[in-house]
Image: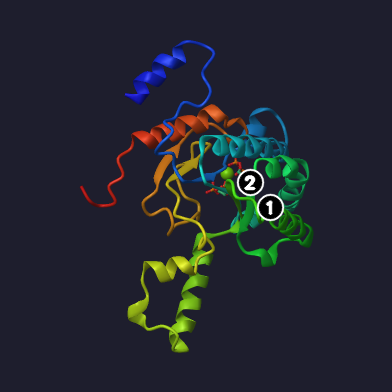
């Protein structure tokens, strides 16, 4: 029904602003922002130009998510495997949070957005940590959209660390093996303060998780697009949300 309505709407230009239903908006949307390098390559530009352009998409999609009433937006910005890339590219990526936050912090404040970061801090340069810490403390009391950057994040590392903590709890008598359940595991993950994602979006045509939130995505709806991240628009985001609204989530039931 909605798709037919949408098709009808989209024939009459210009395309209307977000039309997803007001109810049933995914509470938590997670995004694997992929395709910056290929976007740049197609234009004869260096890969870093793609990352620079991707930063604008981050702003665009943050605002779109906020406007639609999404409560949590989690963006995969740098994986524990991305250190394998050339040093120049990694150096550029490490400077992006500072650049992004310098430019956007006022707008984020105005929109009441709370900035958070999840990942393994220890390997990040101090200037990156400083910029993120400043943004987190400045926005800590904001009550709107929770915007989490997954930076130097890797799901297997996250789970291994959780398992080690749980094992230590058992070893030291704070917990018995029988008490280990979903809740105990979730509460030891970096996402302990976030609900599981309702919707996962990956851009650029790749159909894989690349070590992103393997535990948390167990029952998330997935939406893939060939569009490269720098070109991912509000309309694409709305399409993903609309598609989510058409899905029947069964969680193994009927
Ligand atoms: C996503 O774009 C950004 C990061 C992984 C940091 P890519 O840099 O992976 O772009 P492609 O996949 O090479 O096109
Ligand atoms: C996943 O993209 C990581 C981020 C988007 C930050 P990659 O480009 O690193 O993933 P692979 O290597 O194609 O699986
Ligand atoms: Mg990629």
Which element is circle 1 on? helix
Ligand 3 quadrant in view: top right
Disc 2: which residue: 113
Q: In the displayed structure, does residue 100 sit left or right of residue 16?
A: right
Disc 1: which residue: 139
Mark 1 neighbour density, 10 Å: few (under 14) some (14–19) many (20 or more): many
**Quarter-of-image position of residue 245:** top left
Q: Residue at x 46, y 30 (%)?
A: 239
- Residue 209 vertical placement versus 16 (above, below): below
Q: Could you tell me residue 246's position as x and y percent? A: 34, 33
Mark 2 neighbour density, 10 Å: few (under 14) some (14–19) many (20 or more): many
Q: Could you tell me residue 4's position as x and y percent? A: 35, 20
Inter-mark Cα distance, 1 to 2: 7 Å
- Residue 185 vertical placement versus 173 (above, below): above
User: Looking at mark 2, is its residue's CB closer than 8 Å to ligand 2?
Assistant: no
Q: Which residue is at the front of the view, 96 or 9?
A: 9
Q: Marks 2 and 1: in contact by CB < 8 Å? A: yes
Residue 116 visible in the picture: yes
**Quarter-of-image position of residue 180:** bottom left
Q: Could you tell me residue 253's position as x and y percent? A: 22, 51
Q: Residue at x 36, y 71 (%)?
A: 181
Q: Residue at x 42, y 53 (%)?
A: 217
Earlier sequence position, callout 1 versus callout 2: 2
Q: Which residue is at the front of the view, 113 or 79?
A: 113
**Quarter-of-image position of residue 234:** top right
User: Looking at mark 1, is its residue's CB closer than 8 Å to ligand 2?
Assistant: no
Q: Which residue is at the front of the view, 27 or 204?
A: 27
């Amino acid at each position: 029904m909605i798709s037919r309505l949408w098709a009808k709407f989209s024939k009459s230009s210009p395309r209307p602003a977000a039309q997803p239903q007001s109810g049933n908006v995914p509470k938590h949307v997670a995004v694997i922002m992929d395709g910056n390098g290929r976007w740049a390559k197609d234009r004869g530009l260096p890969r870093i130009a793609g990352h620079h352009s991707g930063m604008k998409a981050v702003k665009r999609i943050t605002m779109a998510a906020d406007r639609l009433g999404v409560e949590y937006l989690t963006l995969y910005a740098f994986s524990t495997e991305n250190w394998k890339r050339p040093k120049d590219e990694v150096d550029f990526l490490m400077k992006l949070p500072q650049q992004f936050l310098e430019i956007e912090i006022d707008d984020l404040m105005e929109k009441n957005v709370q900035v958070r970061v999840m990942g393994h801090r220890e390997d990040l340069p101090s200037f990156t940590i400083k910029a993120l810490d400043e943004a987190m403390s400045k926005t800590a009391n904001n009550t709107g959209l929770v915007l989490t950057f997954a930076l130097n994040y890797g799901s297997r590392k996250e789970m291994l660390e959780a398992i080690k903590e749980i094992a230590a709890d058992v070893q030291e008598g704070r917990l018995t093996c029988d008490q280990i359940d979903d809740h105990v595991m979730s509460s030891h993950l970096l996402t302990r303060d976030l609900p599981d994602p309702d919707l996962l979006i990956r851009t650029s045509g790749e159909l894989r998780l690349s070590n992103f939130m393997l535990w948390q995505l167990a029952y998330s709806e997935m939406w893939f697009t060939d569009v490269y991240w720098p070109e991912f628009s509000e309309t694409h985001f709305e399409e993903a949300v609309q598609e989510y609204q058409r899905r029947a989530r069964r969680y193994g039931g009927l």
